[in-house]
Amino acid sequence: MMKAMCLLGQSNVQLLDIPRPKLLKDTDVVGKVLRATICGSDLHIIDGFFNDQSTSDEEEAKSKTAKTGSIGGKTGFALGHEGVIEITEVGSSVHNFKVGDVCVVSCISCCGECHYCKRNQQSHCARSEGSTPGVLGIEMNGLQSEYCRIPYADHSLYKCPKGIPLDVCLLLSDVLPTSYELGVRGRVQEGDTVAIVGMGPIGLGALLSLKPFKPSQIIAIDTNESRLKVAQSLGATTIINPQKQTNVAEIIHELTGNQGDEVKPGVDLAIECVGFPTTFDTCQDIIAPYGKIAVVGVPGKPFNLKMDELWISNFDLSAGLVSGNSIGELMEKIVSGSLDPSPLITHHFKLSEIEKAYDTFRRSVDTGAIKVSITPDGVEDH
Ligand SMILES: [Zn+2]
Ligand SMILES: [Zn+2]
C-alpha cells in the first residue's frame, strides 16, 4: 500500500492508503514519486468546476456535482499531474528509460504514434486512457502519491538533467510548458510589447519564458499586490493593479503609444492567464494592430468576443490545452541558464502534510504561495 491524495467527491479529498500501482501495459513504467505539486486545475477538479458546464442551470449543475467532483464525475483516484519520479519498474516495450532514471513527468501522457501525436498535437492523443486527454490525476491515479504508473512512458517522460534541482524540474511538468506553448511560443519577437493578465503561476511562467525573446515591455496586470511585486522582481517593466488603476487600457495605450509616429498604441501580445470574461475583455481592449491574444487561463464561462471591433485590427486569437512538446526545449534553456524558474517554488511540504499544502496554495493571496513543492515522506532532498 502507499499514501495518495484521493478525490472522493466534490470538495472531498483525503490522504488515503491505496494499493501501489503495477505495470498494466508493456508501454508503462512505474516510478517512485520524488516531487509533486498542486495546480490550479486540481482545485478546479475538487471544486467540480469542470463538471456539467453544459447546463446553464446553476442549481442543476450544483446538484449534479455535489456527489461527484472531477471531470466526468469519476472519483476515487489520486490527484496530481505534475511531478518528478525515479523509475522503479519498466514495461517490456519501453526503450528510452531504465530503472533508476529520474524523470520529469509530462502532464500529458501520449502514445507518440497516433494521428495527433505524429502532428505534434499530443494534447489530443487518440490513444489516451480515459475520456479526457491523457492527464494523470484526472480519471487515472496521479502524482500526489508515493508511486505512480506512467502510461506511454517513452513519449511522456524527460530525463532530469544533472545539476538541476528537482524543484526546478518539477516546473517542467505543466506550468512552464503550459505558459510557454499557449502564451509565448511562436507569438513574440524581439522588441515586442507584451501584457500578461493574471500573475499566478501561469502568468509568472509566461513572464519567465518570454524574457529570452527580449520584448521591449512586459506589462504585468493583477489585483494581487504581492504577485505584482514578484512579477516586477522577475522582470516586468510595468505593473498595473486594476483595482487601483481602473483605466488599464488607457495606461497601456500611453505606455505603448510613444514608439514613434508610425506605431499605433497597444500591445503586440496579450496573454490571458485567468480564464475570466473580464480578463479576456482587458486583452481585447489593449491589443495593437496585428496583435495576438493568447488565452492560457481555463475558461469556465463563455467569453464575449468583440469581433465587430477587432476584425480590422488583423488580430490573432488562440487558446487550448498544453501538449508538453516544449519540455525538452525548456529544459535546455534551464540548463543553459537563459531560463530560471526557481523563484516560482515558494513553499515545501511533505506528502503527509499535503492538506496543509492545499490550504496554503488555495489561500495564495494571503500566503504568497506560487507553487508548492511536495516531497513524499522518506524521500531525501536532492
Ligand atoms: Zn496543472
Ligand atoms: Zn497519440
Image (cartoon, rainbow, N blue to C red):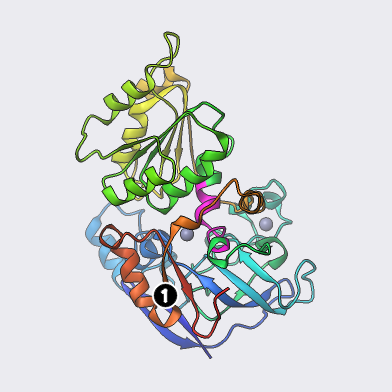
Q: Position of residue 228 (x, y in %)?
A: 32, 45
Query: Is 183 situated left or right of 283 in this image?
Result: right
Q: Position of residue 191 (x, y in %)?
A: 52, 26
- Residue at (47, 49) in percent of width and height: 205
When the figure is inspected, residue 284 is found, relative to residue 103, above or below; the finding is above
One can see residue 205 in this view = yes
Query: Is 83 situated left or right of 24 in this image?
Result: left
Magenta stretch holds residue 8: no
Query: Is 102 situated left or right of 36 in this image?
Result: right
Closer to us: 220 or 145: 220
Magenta segment range?
169-179
Circle 1 residues within 10 Å: few <14, some 14–19, many ≥20:
many
When the figure is inspected, residue 144 is found, relative to residue 366, above or below; the finding is below
Most common secondary structure along the magenta stretch:
helix
Q: Which residue is mark 1?
A: 349
Q: Position of residue 106 (x, y in %)?
A: 60, 61
Residue 193: which quarter of the image?
Answer: top left
Find numbered disc 1 in the image and state the secondary structure of the residue it sits on.
strand
- Residue at (35, 24) in percent of width and height: 255
Quadrant in which the C terminus is drawn? bottom right
Residue 129: which quarter of the image?
Answer: bottom right
Closer to us: 138 or 347: 347
Magenta stretch holds residue 175: yes
Query: Is 331 situated left or right of 204 in this image?
Result: right
| Residue at the bottom extreme, as displayed | 1
Q: Position of residue 195 (x, y in %)?
A: 40, 34
One can see residue 306 in this view = no
Residue type at mark 1 is Phe
Q: Is mark 1 within 8 Å of ligand 1?
A: no
